[in-house]
Image (cartoon, rainbow, N blue to C red):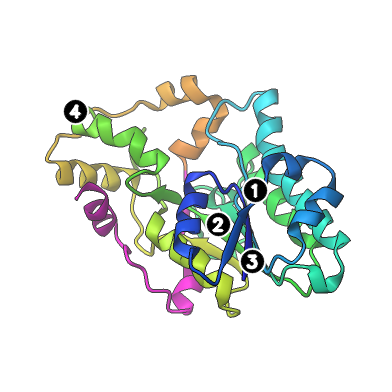
Amino acid sequence: MKVMITGASGYLGQNIINRLHNPSTEIIGINRKLLYGDPNRLAEQLSQADVVINLAGAPIIKRWTSKNKAIIYNSRVLTTKNLCKAINILPKEMQPKTFISASAVGIYREDLVHDETSSRFANHFAARVTDDWEDALVDLPDTIRQVIFRIGVVLGKDSQFIQQVLPIFKMGLGGKIGNGKQPFPFIHVNDLVQAFAAAVTDKHYFGIYNLVAPQQISNKMFTRTLAKKLNRPAILPVPAVALKLAFGKASTLILKNPIVLPKRLEMQKFAYQHPTIESCLDQIID
């Protein structure tokens, strides 16, 4: 089996590659420059691929200046459109059989409850980007099985989020963000990788999935649990105004979140390794 991956050098890409690695699977990273270039050259690389995994995307939690907006948008939407153009160039027998794409729970309107049937989307820049990102796949041939994973906050020993907060909490300087009441949809990287690996080979996976843990927690609960695991206090909150000054409108993704239910994964009896925040943090801190 031949699997081609965009964003192969990133944190998610490296973990997925490690999970898929075996003698019967050839894994090839797609050069970033090809994603922005001539679709014909991209088609040459995609030829004979059985599966395409699309993880490309620039970091989104940064000030949404005009320049940053263009980078964020093009790294997701333009690259995905070019992948679809390249696939359509190929003869049917040379097209991939499966296309798996990352997406984000930030598409959903904050403070509401969402399963995969929800169309109550947020009205900020990140949500509009995510909506266009998913819509870009409409041009794929119907013969290709499509899977879209809307991903929550990824937790793992080397994940960006944990790398940012763990040193602060170890020093006893951690605390809730804003009022701490905002939902905190999360997923352990091991469960994320397992879901992608299942979607590669299991034809029962198709359409949109909320890739989050089944436990519903708030930012305050995450803060308390992490502090308890580290035996440290967590009494220094991060004021909302500080985040707004640092990130501008992008602070919305930190201060306001949706409640996200992984209904389809649960219907398919997905076996979570870390279904609770306690089990996630046990693995990370141990």
Image height of 178 relative to 156, above or below: above
Q: Which residue is mark 2?
A: 150
**Marked residue nearer the N-terminal end (2 or 1):** 1
The number of numbered badges drawn on the structure is 4
**Marked residue nearer the N-terminal end (1 or 4):** 1
Q: Which residue is mark 4?
A: 171
> Looking at the picture, how far across and down is residue 226, in whole percent?
23, 44
Image height of 112 relative to 64, above or below: below
> Looking at the picture, how far across and down is residue 213, in whole percent?
39, 61
Instruction: Report the front residue among 161 and 157.
Output: 157
Q: Is residue 179 visible?
A: no
Closer mark to the observer between disc 3 and disc 4: 3
Question: Residue 262: within the magenta?
Answer: yes
**Marked residue nearer the N-terminal end (2 or 4):** 2
Task: Provide the residue span drawn in magenta.
Answer: 257-286
Please name the amino acid that badge 1 sits on.
Answer: Thr
**Marked residue nearer the N-terminal end (1 or 3):** 3
Question: Residue 246: within the magenta?
Answer: no
**Marked residue nearer the N-terminal end (3 or 4):** 3
Q: Quadrant of residue 266?
A: bottom left
Under circle 4, the secondary element is loop
- Residue at mark 3 to residue at mark 4: CA–CA distance: 46 Å
> Looking at the picture, how far across and down is residue 219, in whole percent?
34, 44
Please name the amino acid that badge 2 sits on.
Answer: Arg
Within 10 Å of disc 4 (Cα), the crowding (few <14, some 14-19, many 20+) is few
Closer mark to the observer between disc 3 and disc 2: 3
- Residue at mark 2 to residue at mark 1: CA–CA distance: 9 Å
- Residue at mark 1 to residue at mark 4: CA–CA distance: 36 Å
Please name the amino acid that badge 4 sits on.
Answer: Met
Task: Tell me which residue sits at (50%, 67%) in the image.
Answer: 197
Q: Which residue is mark 1?
A: 130
Q: Which residue is mark 3?
A: 2
